[in-house]
Image: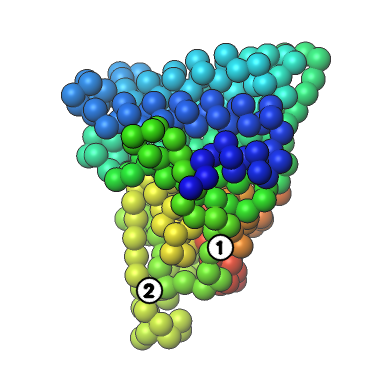
């Protein structure tokens, strides 16, 4: 079975990009090992601070962020980093080639119940003579040179694209290496499985309420087929299910806080997942545009997300 380095070399991935990916992913192996210890290592529970999003940080949000930050700032190919847990971007090496944005621990509400969580990352190639600024990160998602996530579940899995399809790797706990277990993943065009937090239904736009009501109506409704629902409460887990067996994932706009266009963050949640879905033959949109075409305005910008099976995303948008 091929390991990650062999797959990256075989796909002619530039060595400098390989170095950033290898450091990111080997740090995820350390995070995976830490997670396995859980409360034995005293790493569960709250950290006692709030992040720039106004969310209470979990201890593991901070621990995983510090592990990735320290490892990436020490990598000469890294120009700067941006993280869900960092207020501002952090410049690294001015002569570095890559900007990396990451969500160190996605699905934080699942940590203390021992459910699925993950690390999501997005890379851009950019050089410059001056230390990087936030402005340097505001690049459309379609310019990403790599995107992926590590899912910490029953097994730890890496799902990665460098723009040449999507591959899945499984962590061998004995050798601590990711081995290729599924190549060139493709998502079915149609589906009968949807993922959305139904408890927010009364806050959605009428169009979204109509769309979801028709899913729930199943055979008795205009869709003439039954739909199943799943909600992992960790985007990384819901997207992984869709890459494995299809489906649609939606975190729509809602009027709980009309000032926010959505809950999920563009740079280190929506963009990397959108690149993975499109590389796997799926689609990823907000209510109004393709996510990878969005011109970012801020590092922690939020967007609505509708992604998954291409025909079902089109159906949802038709509402
Ligand atoms: O709590 P809700 O409304 O179900 O939202 C769950 C969503 O929020 C998130 O947990 C947000 O991510 P973080 O945990 O990184 O803040 C997503 O992973 C998930 O899809």
Q: Secondary structure at mark 1?
A: loop
Q: Is residue 45 above or below residue 130?
A: below
Q: In the depicted view, which residue is nearer to us: 142 or 255?
A: 142
> How many labels sit on residues?
2
- Look at the numbered disc 2 and say if its residue's Cβ is closer than 8 Å to ligand 1: no
Percent from the top left, x then y, of residue 197?
36, 55
Mark 1 crowd level (few <14, some 14–19, many ≥20, 10 Å Cα)? many
Residue at the front extreme, as displayed: 1
- Give left or right: position of 104 versus 95: left
Q: Is residue 222 visible to us here?
A: yes
Q: Quadrant of the C terminus?
A: bottom right
- Give left or right: position of 282 versus 15: left
- Give left or right: position of 125 versus 248: right
Percent from the top left, x then y, of residue 207?
51, 67
| Residue at 59% from the left image edge and 43% from the top image edge | 7
User: Mark 1 vs mark 2: which is more N-terminal?
Assistant: 1
Give the foreground label among 1 and 2. Answer: 1
Q: In the depicted view, which residue is nearer to us: 62 or 168?
A: 168
Residue position for label 2: 227
| Residue at 51% from the left image edge and 18% from the top image edge | 71
Percent from the top left, x then y, of residue 204?
45, 58
Q: Secondary structure at mark 2?
A: loop
| Residue at 46% from the left image edge and 52% from the top image edge | 181
Q: Is residue 19 above or below residue 169?
A: above
Which image quadrant for residue 230?
bottom left
Which image quadrant for residue 77?
top right
Residue position for label 1: 186
């Amino acid at each position: 079975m091929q390991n990650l380095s062999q797959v990256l070399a075989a796909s002619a991935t530039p060595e400098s990009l390989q170095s950033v990916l290898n450091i990111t992913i080997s740090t995820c192996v350390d995070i995976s090992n830490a997670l396995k210890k859980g409360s034995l290592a005293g790493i569960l529970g709250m950290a006692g601070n709030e992040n720039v999003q106004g969310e209470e940080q979990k201890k593991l949000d901070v621990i995983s962020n510090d592990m990735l930050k320290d490892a990436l700032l020490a990598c000469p190919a890294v120009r700067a980093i941006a993280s869900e847990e960092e207020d501002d971007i952090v410049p690294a090496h001015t002569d570095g080639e890559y900007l990396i944005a990451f969500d160190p621990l996605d699905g934080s509400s699942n940590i203390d119940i021992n459910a699925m969580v993950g690390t999501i990352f997005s890379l851009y190639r950019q050089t410059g003579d001056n230390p990087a600024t936030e402005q340097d990160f505001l690049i459309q998602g379609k310019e990403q040179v790599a995107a992926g996530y590590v899912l910490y579940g029953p097994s730890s899995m890496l799902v990665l694209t460098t723009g040449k399809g999507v591959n899945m790797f499984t962590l061998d706990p004995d050798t601590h290496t990711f081995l290729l277990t599924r190549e060139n993943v493709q998502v079915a065009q149609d589906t009968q499985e949807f993922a959305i937090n139904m408890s927010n239904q009364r806050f959605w736009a009428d169009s979204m309420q109509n769309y979801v009501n028709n899913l729930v109506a199943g055979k008795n409704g205009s869709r003439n087929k039954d739909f199943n629902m799943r909600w992992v409460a960790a985007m990384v887990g819901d997207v992984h299910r869709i890459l494995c067996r299809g489906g649609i994932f939606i975190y729509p706009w809602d009027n709980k806080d009309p000032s926010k266009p959505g809950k999920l963050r563009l740079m280190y949640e929506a963009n990397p997942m959108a690149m993975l879905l499109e590389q796997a033959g799926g689609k990823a949109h907000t209510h109004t545009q393709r996510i990878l075409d969005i011109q970012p305005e801020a590092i922690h910008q939020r967007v609505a997300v509708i992604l998954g099976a291409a025909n079902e995303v089109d159906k949802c948008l038709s509402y």
